[in-house]
Amino acid sequence: FWATVQQGPEDPILGVQDKFNADKDPKRVNLGVGAYRDENGKPWVLDSVLKAEDILQKKKLNKEYLPITGAADFTKLASELAYGKESKPIVEDRIAVAQSISGTGALRIATGFLSFHYTGPQVVYIPNPTWGNHIPIVEQTGMKSARYRYFDKKTVGLDFEGMKEDIEAAEPGSIILLHACAQNPTGIDPTKEQWKELSILLKQKQHLALFDMAYQGFASGDVSGDAFAVRHFVEQGHQIILCQSFAKNLGLYGERAGTFSMVCSSKEEKNRVLSQVKRVIRPLYSSPPLHGAQLVATILGTPELLELWLTEVKKMADRIIDMRSKLYDLLVKLETPGEWGHIKSQIGMFSFTGLTPEQVTALAEHAHVYMTMDGRISMAGLNDHNVQYFAESMSKAVKG
Ligand code: LMR
């Protein structure tokens, strides 16, 4: 049956993990996948999550199916976290929301729904560069993907003029995918003023804003601050689509907890939209998993746990910020050719170092250091035990 099936390429991000796993050198460093590691390089199950687990255990809940759109307490609390409790569409009950298999699943529901129901151009504009999974998610539903300029190699910053030009040039009513905060892979976000300009531009062009929010709280440690773009667009009347993930900010990677939501113009429209969202989800996976949603709902719905989580998400953000400045100081001390200020100014899980594919390969081969080929490093993979070794190895690779 399968004689004609060709070998597929490795996943550009998850494939790095396989290479790291195959390397048994004690010095090995994994800066590939964006998953938080503590100061000893170990995965961290948050205390707020452990406490929520205890509460759930005591409740002895059953394991019945969730509704197609997921757990209602979870989707309500998750939406309030993203949009803000006082957000007009929340108060007016006109957000169509469904629990999703984390951020990827939310994006897949989005493109599934859009491919059936969007009457505007079936093109999703994606920043260049972007997260490696965006294009396949869009294209698997038969929609087209196009790119808008985002990263300026010369300034190692945002190419805001290029971004605006490309969004302006897109056919009116195009779908524009925006990273809500902590852009992956660059770690470079528009400023508040730039977001305001983008909101005006998208409105003028009647584009549809599709937000991918995988790092709320993780970028700055402030969950409201990181939701600025989403909340501003909604305040300005955009009927956004939002894909929300709890993988990073609650450390629930494998639990696959997230939401897909759409701001509608009325409650009646919301109900119609949701009836079609269900028709996208049901043949895909029927209904979402229970446990992660129960954990998130318990944390967000219990004041002491919410408070604890807010300190924990800040702790993760702060440790990463500390690693940024340590890495920067070391690279400068080692007289590494180039300008490394971007390592400190970029935000979120990643730094887009500017290392070339040759340097990335050399680091894996000679120093057992692993990262994606675009030179992105997961800052969370660095800690006080390995940052010196990494800086020395990186410096050596840059010097050639
Ligand atoms: C990443 O970019 O490393 C993470 O978002 C994990 C993933 O699924 O790619």
Image (cartoon, rainbow, N blue to C red):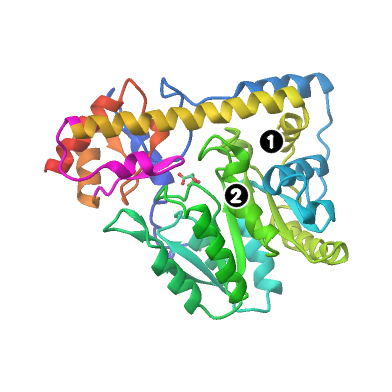
Predominant SS of the magenta segment: loop
Q: Are the residues flagged by discs 2 and 1 in contact, CB closer than 8 Å?
A: no
Magenta-tinted stretch: 333-355
Q: State the residue position of label 1.
A: 292
Examine the image and state in which quarter residue 113 appears: bottom right
Whether disc 2's CB lies below 8 Å from ligand 1 is answered no
Q: Residue furthest right?
A: 268
Identify which residue, 338 or 105, lies in the foreground.
338
Label 2 belongs to which residue? 228
Q: State the residue in front, 292 or 266.
A: 266
Residue 130 visible within the image: yes
> x%, y% of residue 239?
70, 64
Q: Residues within 10 Å of mark 1 (few under 14, many from 20)?
A: many
- The spot of residue 158 in percent (x, y) is 39, 57
| Residue 346 painted magenta | yes
Q: Residue at x 72, y 41 (%)?
A: 289
Left of 375 or right of it: where is 181? right
Q: Earlier in the sequence, mark 2 or mark 1?
A: 2
Look at label 2 and name its amino acid. Answer: Phe
Distance from disc 2 to disc 1, alpha carbons, whole Å, reads 25 Å
